Amino acid sequence: MTRILERKGVKFGKGESKLNRRRARSRMDTDRNGMPWTSVDEADEINYTQHQPGGLILLGGASDFQAPARQGVGLVAGWGVLADKFNRLRELIESYGSCVVAYSGGVDSVFLARVARDVLGDKSLAVIADSPSLPRRELEEALAIAREFGIPVQVTRTKEFDNPSYLANPANRCYFCKHELFTELEPMARAGGFAVIAYGENASDVGDFRPGAKAAGEFQVRAPLKEAGLTKAEIRELSAQLGLPTADKPQMACLSSRIPYGEPVTPEKLLMIERAEYVLRDLGFHDVRVRHHELRQGQLARIEVGPAELAKCLAEDNSTRIAVALKEIGYQHVTLDLQGYRRGSVNEALARPVPARVTGAA
């Protein structure tokens, strides 16, 4: 099923209200804010949470987009190193001639897709991979952002859940996910006449354990943010200057990252995790992870929130509300990680030494 969207006098989808709240904190206020869209077929209600597998959703067009006045190389004039990096990024993207951006709705991919759109116009395309590992709200918000900023985007259904190697959840699980993504993107790019596939790895990712980068190398996928030397903090600053609502968005990773390596990934577990994280986000928590552990006595939820939010989580009204809600979802045990959220905590087990096996009487 293919949908082409156009402006109409109706409200756009479920992601609108959250985007409006985030947009109020951004630095841009243009007449595109709150621009309503609907389906060409007015009788066909938009519901991104129930789109057909493999279906495409196309938004925006070359003649439809008007960049903000502060867009372009002059955006960071006089900022020295950051200006050089931003200009280098634009030059890299311009050298591609055309490109497909692996799009997720996160800080990096939104920024990359926006700059690609500014530089290449309709010779750029953002593609978002949909699977059970992508929260429904993330999909809705990613599409809403693309609509607002005139970024053409397609949704493709990836099939990593058909791969036993992915479901086994080894330490290099991300390799199989990215391999599946680029397997989908390569023929799409070829069929559409796009010369390059690009994704949102940045300079802050250098040195991290990132198995997905191996898959990117195998498919010759470019990482222009990293090549330009842009760090996560710099991407957030530039995003704010461009008025992108993702400038202050918390870091996100796929839902499968909440399951410890070696424990199988299933759609049922991911749905529990997704619903549990909604509970915390709806209570106003910013940095949130619900780690899913399988015990003999049932499932355990290990909650991570930002260190500054620990006291809020422990407040009696919140702690009781969270525990009750997560048990209704199906968790038998609900715990709080007292170290708080930290990036890549699931990888901590990889660095932990294996204890020596002791034999004989204790």
Image: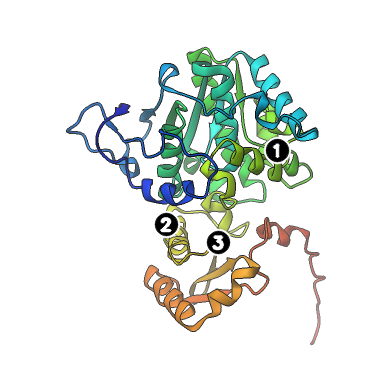
In the image, 12 versus 205, the foreground residue is 12
Q: Quadrant of the C terminus?
A: bottom right
Q: Is residue 63 above or below residue 268?
A: above
Q: Whole-percent x and y of residue 201?
A: 67, 37
Judged left or right of residue 274, residue 101 is right
Dot 2 or dot 3, earlier in sequence: 2
- Helix, strand or loop at disc 1? loop
Q: Is residue 102 above or below residue 303?
A: above
Q: Is residue 10 above or below residue 63?
A: below
Dot 2 or dot 1, earlier in sequence: 1
Q: Choose mark 2 or mark 3, whichever is in front.
A: 3
Identity of the residue drawn at 49% across and 77% down: 333
Is residue 165 visible to us here?
Answer: no
Q: Residues within 10 Å of mark 1 (few under 14, many from 20)?
A: many
Q: Whole-percent x and y of residue 360?
A: 81, 82
Residue 271, labelled with which disc? 2
- The amino acid sitting under disc 2 is Leu
Q: Quadrant of the N terminus?
A: top left
Which quadrant of the structure image shows residue 215? top right
Q: Whole-percent x and y of residue 121?
A: 52, 18
Q: Choose mark 2 or mark 1, whichever is in front.
A: 1
Identity of the residue drawn at 70% across and 29% down: 86
Q: Residues within 10 Å of mark 3 (few under 14, many from 20)?
A: many
- The amino acid sitting under disc 3 is Val
Which quadrant of the structure image shows residue 346? bottom right
In the picture of the structure, the residue carrying the numbered disc 1 is 202
Residue 85, labelled with which disc? none
Query: In whole angstroms, how far apart are the C-alphas of marks 3 and 1?
Result: 22 Å
In the picture of the structure, the residue carrying the numbered disc 3 is 288
Dot 3 or dot 1, earlier in sequence: 1
